[in-house]
């Protein structure tokens, strides 16, 4: 497994690519998918997530293989967000 409950993680893959780069908190393990393996319930730490069914909201289910834990130093900094960056011209 890549993550465990309570970890902060970044999504590296998603069904339509819409959640890639989102920072999430890993919740409960929902079970095992026949093709994707372990499935976790995650909650966003920034922008909304898109489910496999196209619903938009603060939570979704995500395959363990699609998540990577953030380093403890980054996760504990409190400064993580996936909000868009403002770029000055």
Image (cartoon, rainbow, N blue to C red):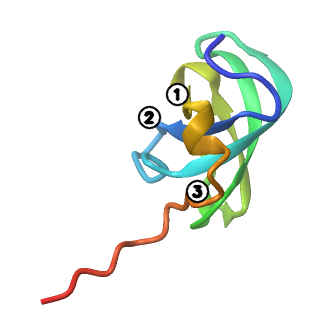
Query: Total number of numbered labels?
Result: 3
Q: Residue at x 67, y 22 (%)?
A: 3
Q: Could you tell me residue 40's position as x and y percent?
A: 75, 30
**Measured Cα–Cα span from mark 3 to mark 2:** 12 Å
Find disc 1 in the rendering and name its residue.
Answer: 66
Q: Could you tell me residue 34's position as x and y percent?
A: 67, 10
Q: Could you tell me residue 60's position as x and y percent?
A: 71, 47
Quadrant of the image containing the C terminus: bottom left
Q: Spot the residue most to the left.
A: 89
User: SS at mark 1?
Assistant: helix
User: SS at mark 2?
Assistant: loop
User: SS at mark 3?
Assistant: strand
Q: 1 or 33: nearer the eye?
A: 1
Image position of 6 with respect to 20: above or below: above
- Among the 4 quarters of the image, the one containing residue 52: top right
Q: Earlier in the sequence, mark 1 or mark 2?
A: 2
**Measured Cα–Cα span from mark 3 to mark 1:** 14 Å
Residue 31 relative to residue 40: left or right = right
Find disc 2 in the rendering and name its residue.
Answer: 13
Quadrant of the image containing the N terminus: top right
User: In the rendered structure, are the residues bearing label 3 and label 2 in contact, judged by CB atoms less than 8 Å apart?
Assistant: no
Image position of 72 with respect to 89: above or below: above
Give the number of the disc on residue 2. Answer: none
Which of the two discs, 3 and 2, sits closer to the camera? 2
């Amino acid at each position: 497994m890549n993550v465990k409950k309570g970890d902060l993680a970044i999504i590296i893959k998603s069904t339509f690519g819409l959640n890639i780069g989102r920072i999430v908190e890993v919740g409960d393990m929902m079970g095992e998918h026949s093709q994707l393996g372990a499935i976790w319930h995650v909650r966003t730490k920034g922008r909304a997530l898109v489910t496999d069914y196209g619903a938009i909201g603060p939570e979704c289910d995500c395959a363990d293989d699609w998540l990577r834990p953030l380093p403890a130093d980054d996760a504990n900094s409190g400064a993580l967000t996936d909000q868009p960056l403002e770029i000055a011209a």
